[in-house]
């Protein structure tokens, strides 16, 4: 896992070279991404980084969507039952796309003559983010959706890979209950860090975003006890009132929690989002090392999938 995470910038470049279908998306008013876990996060990143409206569905049931919506099913294995179920309900719609390495999703897409991006197999889904995301970005750009900053994002990732000392210090410094806070518009990065800490470091974590957290989570700190760590994702484009809130919270919880901050890199939203994601991914690997756990296996997810496969 560590090597895959370290190679993320190069994998993004390789992923961009994949051939993707071309579609005229003129008239498409929004996107609906169907996907779970390490695949579904791709939808959150696209939502955070493009101008078009994007919703992410993590359910068996396809939500109401108008005919002008592009529905994108993303499942790395191609066998995730929630994604297969919601995508089956979308099959009659005008604009659909599937992204997978194989499994039942590719069979479904082939039999329904659905545009498909097939990506290499053999990785843990969350380590295949480069392949789940960049060919989709290429497809969307080719099809007329504006997502800027691809080259800048890859340069930012490369510069992070060269300097990981501070990220290792953060991973080593994490203790107790873990909270991840982000400014609005970076919910994908915050969710990704939470899920990477869960799956790589086998540790519980929660995430929340400003300014919303000041209206609920904030109050929970009144009675906080024990050890706590908060990682705050920071961005140069934060609203000045959001910055004021973050600075206030640092003071407010400082006596009760360790606080670490990581900062976005670059001008484009894609670079800023992915630079936070990549720093978070590395922190989760360093935390796994500190915890003495193998980052790769996700036995409890496998056990549940196995259980569910028997009770159909
Ligand atoms: O990281 C993981 O293994 C999970 O979060 C999976 O991504 C999730 O279970 C969905 O599987 P898939 O990505 O194959 O659709």
Image (cartoon, rainbow, N blue to C red):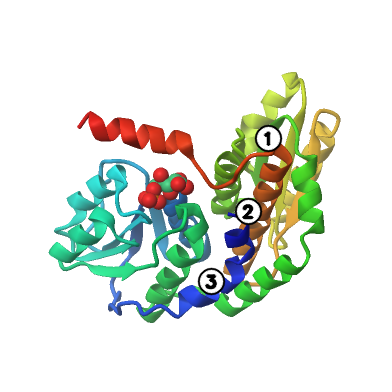
Q: Is residue 208 left or right of 96 when viewed as pictured?
A: right
Mark closest to the chain's N terminus, 2 or 1: 1
Q: Which residue is mark 3?
A: 12
Quadrant (top left, top right, bottom left, bottom right) of the C terminus: top left
- At 43% from the left and 76% from the top, the residue drawn is 138
**Can you see residue 56?**
no
Q: Which residue is mark 2?
A: 281
Report whether the residue tagged 2 is closer than 8 Å to ligand 1: no
- At 79% from the left and 32% from the top, the residue drawn is 257
Location of residue 52 in the rendering, given as x and y in whole percent from the top left corner: 42, 65
| Front of the two marks 2 and 1 | 2
- At 13% from the left and 63% from the top, the residue drawn is 111
Q: Which residue is mark 1?
A: 178
**Can you see residue 235?**
yes
For this rendering, which residue is in front, 209 or 92?
92
10 Å crowding of disc 2: few (<14), some (14-19), many (20+): many
Q: Is residue 81 left or right of 204 when viewed as pictured?
A: left
């Amino acid at each position: 896992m560590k090597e895959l995470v370290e190679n993320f910038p190069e994998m993004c470049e390789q992923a961009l070279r994949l051939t993707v279908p071309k579609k005229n998306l003129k008239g498409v008013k929004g996107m609906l991404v169907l996907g779970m876990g390490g695949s579904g996060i791709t939808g959150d990143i696209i939502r955070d980084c493009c101008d078009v409206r994007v919703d992410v569905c993590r359910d068996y049931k396809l939500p109401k969507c108008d005919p002008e919506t592009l529905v994108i099913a993303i499942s790395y294995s191609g066998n995730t039952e929630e994604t297969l179920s919601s995508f089956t309900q979308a099959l009659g719609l005008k604009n659909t796309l599937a992204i997978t390495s194989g499994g039942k999703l590719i069979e479904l897409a082939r039999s329904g003559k659905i545009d498909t991006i097939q990506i290499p197999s053999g990785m843990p889904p969350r380590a295949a983010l480069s392949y789940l995301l960049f060919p989709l970005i290429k497809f969307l750009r080719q099809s007329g959706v504006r997502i800027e900053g691809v080259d800048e994002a890859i340069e930012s990732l490369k510069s992070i890979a060269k300097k990981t000392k501070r990220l290792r210090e953060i991973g080593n410094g994490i203790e107790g209950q873990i909270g991840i806070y982000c400014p609005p518009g970076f919910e994908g990065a915050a969710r990704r860090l939470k899920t990477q800490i869960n799956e790589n470091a086998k540790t519980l974590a929660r995430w929340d975003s400003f300014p919303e957290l000041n209206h609920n989570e904030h109050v929970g700190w009144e009675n906080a006890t024990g050890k706590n760590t908060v990682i705050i994702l920071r961005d140069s484009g934060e609203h000045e009132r959001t910055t004021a809130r973050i600075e206030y919270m640092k003071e407010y919880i400082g006596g009760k929690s360790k606080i670490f901050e990581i900062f976005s890199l670059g001008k484009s939203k894609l670079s800023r989002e992915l630079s936070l994601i990549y720093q978070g991914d590395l922190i989760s690997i360093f935390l796994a090392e500190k915890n003495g756990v193998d980052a790769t296996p996700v036995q409890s997810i496998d056990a549940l999938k196995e259980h569910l496969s028997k009770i159909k």
